[in-house]
Amino acid sequence: MKRIFSTLLIAGLALTQMQAQDYEEVWIYPDGNFPELNGHENDSPRTTSNWTAQPYMHIYRADKNKAAARTVVCLPGGGYSHLSLVNEGSSWAPYFNNLGINLVVLAYRMPYGHDQIPQNDVYDGIRYLKAHATELGIDPNKVGIMGFSAGGHLASTVATRAPKDVRPNFQILFYPVISMDTLVTHRGSHDHLIGRYAGQEMVDLYSNEKQIDAQTPPAIILLADDDRAVPSPNGVNYYLAMKKKGIPATLHVYPKGGHGFGFKDTFKYHDAMLKDLTDWLLGL
């Protein structure tokens, strides 16, 4: 895998948090040996605001003096048509690193009619992290998944369907798309992933509240009650399905905030949300 070292300055954070964030970039398929093609792998440039031609990871490593060796693999949202790489990606690096947690922002490819491409990109990204665990200073048994909106759907897909070697140890879901049922789903995510006229078998397969089993890891779900893009029953029903299976789950529904609040400090409950997430992480 191709590895590049770079630095990103996260803007808009409190002065005490502002810092130059060093990251390591890893291309998941640097030799172009994609397990499945979506027809856009040779597009240029490699990434724009709308799509990713070459899937990659940005690895933000915590200070090893306070690191807990825990790692969060972050999947930005974007309706399976683009990626919110800052608000739902790199902006989270200082928060996690300050907790001693490594953050990996994984830019996965869009499906373009191939529903398994996003999850396979994630599987192979996690395989790389586990294979290089000692080098990266991470514990391969403390790798969790985090996703926002459609990225939350992808994260819950990985959490419920991944092979044993890449099944995450915990999941963090922000205002996630969970169901593909057209009565509650986010229609854009549905259409881009499984197609506008998907049959019931595909709808059920990607309705992740139906895919929970004994191996599904604990979850925290965070969303706003007034979210009009992804209706709250997505996250709520996932929580209830986990409880029915006896799997630890925590749900936080904030009164207002709409969709896509991510790391925005304009979100009224930003500080409360960070405290809720921190308390949960520290209790793992």
Image (cartoon, rainbow, N blue to C red):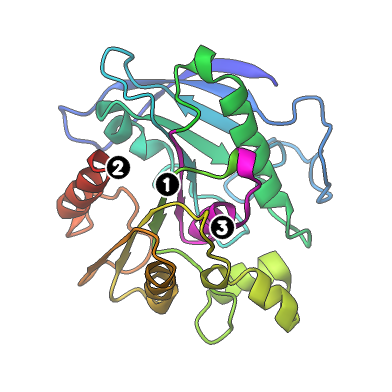
Question: In 3D space, how far apart are the residues under numbered discs 2 and 3 (Cα atoms)?
Answer: 19 Å
Q: Which residue is mark 2?
A: 284
Q: Which residue is mark 3?
A: 160
* Disc with the residue nearer the chain's start (1 vs 3): 3
> What residue is rendered at 25% in x and 48% in y?
280
> Dot 3: what SS?
helix
Q: Which residue is mark 1?
A: 170
Q: Which mark is residue 154?
A: none
Confirm whether residue 194 shows in the render: yes
Residue 159 among those drawn in magenta: yes
Type of amino acid at the residue the image marks with label 2: Leu
The residue carrying pointer 3 sits among few (fewer than 14), some (14 to 19) or many (20 or more) residues within 10 Å by Cα, namely many
> What residue is rendered at 32% in x and 16% in y?
63
Confirm whether residue 198 shows in the render: no
Up the image or down, 283 lies above or below 258; here it is above
The picture places residue 187, in percent across and down from the top left corner, at 58, 76
Type of amino acid at the residue the image marks with label 3: Thr
Quadrant of residue 181 within the rendered picture: bottom right
* Disc with the residue nearer the chain's start (2 vs 1): 1
Up the image or down, 83 lies above or below 43; here it is below
